[in-house]
Amino acid sequence: MSSQKSRFSTTDQEIMLGLARESIEYGLQKGGVLPVDPELYEGDLRENGACFVTLKRSGQLRGCIGSISAYQPLIMDVADKAHGAAFRDPRFPPLRKNEWPGLDLHISVLTPLQEMQFVSEADLLSKIRPLQDGLVLEDGRYKGTFLPVMWEQLPTAPEFLAHLKLKAGLTVDHWSPRIRVWRFQAESIKA
C-alpha cells in the first residue's frame, strides 16, 4: 500500500490476474485446482512467493485465502489461493457459476515476515506503520493476520491492533509477555 514502484511489471500483473481468473474458471468447470507449470514463467513469478487472493461483490467479502510464508513458486501460489478463495474459504459456501460474473479480484503479494521487537503494547503501537504494515500476531495457540488493506477500515494503530487481537481469538485488552508480532508489506494487484 505504499507509493513505491511496483516490483512487478504490468505484464506480470496481468499474468497473475489472468491466471487467478483462469484458476477459478477451471474450478467451476472441472472442480479441481488449475495445474500450473512454473517453468513456463519468468523472473519473480517463478520464485517462491506468498500471496492472498480476495474476492468481493459490491465491496463485500466473498472469499479470501492466502499464505504468509513463501513455500512454492508465486505463480502456483496465485492459482492455488484463487481457487481457495472461491471454493475453500470456510466462511462461505463454494462459489457457484452464477456468482462468478461481477466479482472483484484482488491479489496481495507479501514480503517476507519480519519479527518486531517491543517491550510493551505502547512500544509495539509506536512501531506499527499505518497504511504500510500488515501484521501477524501470535500468543500461544492464538493467531491472527491482517493484510495492510485493513487500514482502510481500521485507520489507527490502536484500532488495527485491537481488531487483530479479536481476530486471533483474544480480547482487545489482552496483553502478555508471550505475544509475538511480525510485520510484512503487500503489493496490491487489482483487476
Image (tube, rainbow, N blue to C red):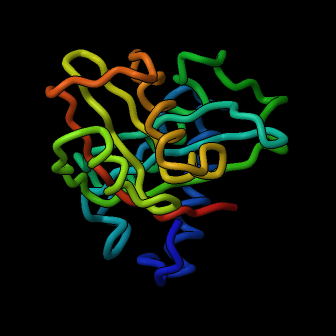
Q: Residue at x 23, y 15 (%)?
A: 141
Expressed as whole percent of the image width and height from the top left, the position of residue 29 reads 66, 31
Q: What residue is shown at x 72% (from left), y 40% (from top)? A: 56
Where is residue 190 drawn, in percent x and y? Answer: 65, 61
**Residue at left 59%, top 42%?**
54
The image shows residue 161 at horizontal and vertical percentages of 44, 38
Pick the front one: 8 or 150: 150
Tally of marks: 0
Quarter holding residue 109: bottom left
**Would residue 37 be seen by someone viewing this image from the given angle?**
no
Of residues 190 and 121, which is closer to you in this image? 121
Q: Where 104 sits versus 92, above or below? A: below
The residue lying toward the viewer, choosing from 159 and 58, is: 159
Which quadrant does the C terminus fall into?
bottom right
Q: Is residue 182 visible?
A: yes
Q: Is residue 183 left or right of residue 65?
A: left
Q: Residue at x 45, y 32 (%)?
A: 164
Side of 151 where 129 appears, left or right: left
**Residue 125 placement (x, y as % from top left):** 36, 48
Task: Tell me if residue 19 comes above or below residue 139 in the rendering.
Answer: below
